[in-house]
Amino acid sequence: MPSKTAMARAQKDKREGKSASTQAGEFVREEIEHVRKGKHGARSSAQAIAIGLSEARRAGIKVPAKKGATAKKSATAKKSSRKKPAAKKATKKTSAKRSRATLGALKREGSAAASKTALARHARKAASKRTASERSASAKKAARTMGPAVRKAAAKKAAAHRSAASRSAGATRAARTRAMRARSR
């Protein structure tokens, strides 16, 4: 059951005109916190995220289904979904016994799936599956949709966290370039 705070944050995001995935992110964040605090565990980061997205869908946030899910639907599944009238498509309530069993299984899992390392690994893996143009478009949209103050803060943070090694490497490269240009004159 999603908490009132997650619902409130998601509704705030909706009022601000943020995307459905951003609204759903509030539920995912809450789920990660549950795993970290030991309310229950998760086998992988993907499972923790999936639970959060499921909660978001139940709360009425229009999170799109996984991209490949509709394309891979078999012919029989398509046919059966066409046959059923809209009234019959009502979802059944999960039995209490099944809910308890699910929670019991989750409680037996560890909390390592919600660690910073595991989440970072998951993010890198997910990003690697996207093409360079998709990643670029996403970054451009992020820069476009955040305000100038947020953009400035992000730039400052990036500059502060750039390692000394990379700064010195850049300085070395610049010095080498200047030397080469001086020789060619």
Image (cartoon, rainbow, N blue to C red):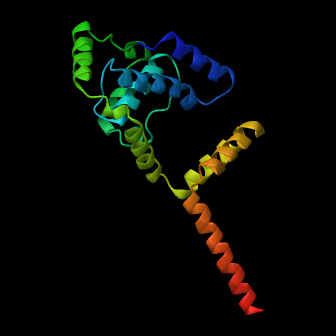
Q: Give the quadrant of residue 47.
A: top left
Residue 78: tell me if it is visible. no
- Compared to 103, does 151 lie above or below? below
Choose top left, top right, bottom left or bottom right for residue 54: top left
Q: Residue at x 51, y 56 (%)?
A: 131
Query: Which residue is at a point 56% across and 55% down the rendered structure image?
Result: 163
Foreground pick, 56 / 2: 2
Q: Is residue 17 left or right of residue 1?
A: right
- Dividing the image into 4 quarters, which one contains the N terminus? top left
Q: Position of residue 14 (x, y in %)?
A: 63, 22
- Residue 40 lies, in percent from the top left, at 31, 20
- Percent across and percent down for residue 57 are 46, 22
Q: Is residue 17 left or right of residue 82?
A: right
Left or right of residue 40, residue 10 in this image: right
Regarding residue 81, the answer to whether it shows in the image is yes
Q: Can you tell which quarter of the image residue 180 is in?
A: bottom right
Q: How many marks?
A: 0
Quadrant of the image containing the C terminus: bottom right
Q: Is residue 148 above or below residue 36?
A: below
Residue pictured at 30% horizontal, 25% vertical: 41
Q: Nearer the viewer, residue 77 or 28?
A: 28
In front of the other: 125 or 175: 175
Residue 159 x/y as whole percent: 65, 51
Q: Residue furthest top?
A: 96
